[in-house]
Image: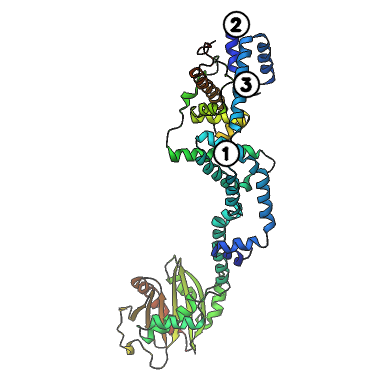
Amino acid sequence: MSDQTCLRILGLLDSYLDHELSSDVALEVANHLKACDRCSRELDARRVLVNRLRGAVRSVSAAPGLQSAICESVRSNLQPSRSRFSRTALPIAAALLACLSAAVAYRLGYLRFTKSSQESYLASISAPIPDILRVGLGDHVHCAVFRAFSKQHPTPAEMAQDLGPYKDLAPLVSKSIPGDYRLEMAHQCRYHARRFVHLTMRRGFTLVSLVISRRGDGESFARDQFLPALTESGIDLYQGSAQRFQISGFQTHDYLVYVVSNLGRQDNLNMMLALAPSVASLLESIPGSAS
Amino acid sequence: MSALALTGCLVDDRISREHAAGPRPATDRETADRFQLEAMPHLNDLFRTATHTLGDRTQAEDVVQEAYLQAWKSFHRFESGTNCRAWLFGILFNCIHHHRRKLFRFPLLKPNEEFLEANISYTPPLPDRLSDGEILAALDTVPADYRAVVLLVDVEEFAYKEVAGILGVPIGTVMSRLSRGRKMLRERLADVARSYGIGEGSGKGETA
C-alpha cells in the first residue's frame, strides 16, 4: 500500500467515521481499510476516542434545579409571540385607528367648533378692533373659515343664481384677482340677522373673502374715528387686523365692502386695491336692492 | 378588533395579559405544552455542551436558561416537525457567542488558522486506563471553537451540515475544526498518558 494512498485515506478517515462520505468514496475507504492494517488501526483509535469522549461528556447532567428554573421563567413569559406584537405593532395600530376615527369624526362634523364656541372665538379675536370692521370679519370667519365648503365648487351659473342682483360680481372679481387665485364661492348669506354678499377666493392655504353688506343707519368708517389707511382712486381704504386676519374696508353710499384674509397686511390691502374701484362702480350701478 | 380593545392593550399590558389568560388559555397552554414536549427533553444535551464549551457549570446554567427563554420567545417561529434539537443548539451557540464576547472580548479564530492538514497523521491509540475526568480535563484545553465542533459531532452526533447551521460557519470549517480538535485532544491525552508512564514507547506518533 503506497504512502500516497494512505495519506489520501487518512484525510478521509474523520468523515468516514462520521458517515459523511458519499457511498462510492466510503466504499473506496472501506476497501483500503480491509487491506491496510495501519490505517485500520488509526480508524479504531479515532473511534475509541470518540466513544470515550461521548461517554465522559454524557456523564454530566444538568442540576435538577435548572429545569424548574427554566420552566419558571417560561411560565412568567407566557404569550411569547403576542407580547412582542403588543409592544410594537399594537400601539402603532391603535394610533392609526385613533387618527382614522378623528378624521372620520371631522368629516362628519363632530370635531368642528360649535356655534357658541365659534361666537366666543370671534368675540375674543375681534375685541380690539372697531365694530365696523367686525361686520366683515364676522361673516368671513363664520362663513368661509368655519363652514367647510364642499369639495365641489359651484359653477359660474350657480354662482350667478345665488348672487341674484349681484350676479355681475363673480365675473368681475374673477377678472380682477391675481391669476393664481380662484373664485371658490359666491353667494348671499346671513349672519347675525345681517345680509351679506360674500365671495371667497383661495390660493393654497390662503383664503380671501370679499364681503359686502348694506350700510345701516349711521354706520360709517369715518364716524368710528377710524382714519383711512390709504386713499387711492378716490376711495378711502380702512385697515385693521385681528390675530391672523387682516381686514380692509371701504364704504360707498349704500354699502360697506370688506376684504378679509389670512394674508399679510400689505397683501390684503393690495387685494382690496385690485378689487375696490370696479366693485365700487358696480355697486353704484345696482339700484337699492339689498334689503 | 375594536378600538377599545386596542387601546386596552396600550393602556395596561398587564391587564390585557390577565385578560388574555381568561378567554384564551387553551392556546397558551397548548403552546406551553408543546414547548415542554419538544424543547425541554434536550435540556441535558444543551447543558453539557454549554458546560464544556464554556468550561464552567455556573456560566453554562445561565447561558442555557437564557437560550431556553429565547427559544420560548421565538417558539412561534419554530416549525413543528422540523429539527427542534438543532434549532435549540443554534440558539444556544448564539447565546454562548454573546456571552463570551461579553466576558472576554477575545477575537475569534482567523480563517487562516483553520487550514491545517491536522488529520493526515497517525496519533497514538488512547490508553484504556485514562479516566473520564482526565478526558474531560484534556477536552477543556482544546480551544473553544474546536471544542464546540468536537462536542457537537462526537457527543451530540449532529451531521456536519447541521453543525454548520448551528454555528453559522461553512461546512469546510466544521470539517477542519473537527479534525484539528480531535487531533489536539488525542495529543493532550497522549501527554497525560506519557506522564503516567502509560503508552511509553509508542512515541509521539508516526507521520505517514
Q: CA distance from mark 3 to mark 1?
A: 24 Å
Residue farthest to the top?
A: A1
Q: Which chain does tag 1 point to?
A: B
**Chain on which label 3 sits:** A
Q: Is residue A50 visible?
A: yes
Q: Between tags 2 and 1, which lies in front?
A: 1
Same chain letter for marks 2 and 1: no
Vertical side of B206 occupied by B1: above or below: below
Question: Do discs 3 and 1 belong to a common subunit?
Answer: no
Q: Which residue is mark 1?
A: B47
User: At label 2, which amino acid type do we have?
Assistant: Ser
Q: Residue at x 63, y 48 (%)?
A: B76
- Cα distance, mark 2 to mark 1? 45 Å
Point out residue B204 in the picture as x, y percentages from the top left corner: 50, 13
Q: Are marks 3 and 2 on the same chain?
A: yes
**Going 49% across and 24% down the picture, which residue do you hit?**
B114
The image quadrant of residue A240 is bottom left
Please tell me which residue is depicted at 67% across the width and 39% down the height of the picture: B82
Q: As shown in the figure, which amino acid type bears the numbered disc 1? A: Phe
Residue that label 2 marks? A2
Which comes before the other along the chain, label 3 or label 2?
2
Residue B27 coordinates in the image, percent (x, y): 68, 55
Using a 10 Å C-alpha cutoff, classify the residue at mark 2 as few (fewer than 14 neighbours), some (14 to 19) or many (20 or more).
few
Relative to A95, does residue B51 appear above or below in the rendering? Answer: above
Left or right, residue B49 beside residue A228: right
Q: Which residue position is annotated with label 3?
A: A47
Asked which quadrant contains residue B186, the reply is: top right
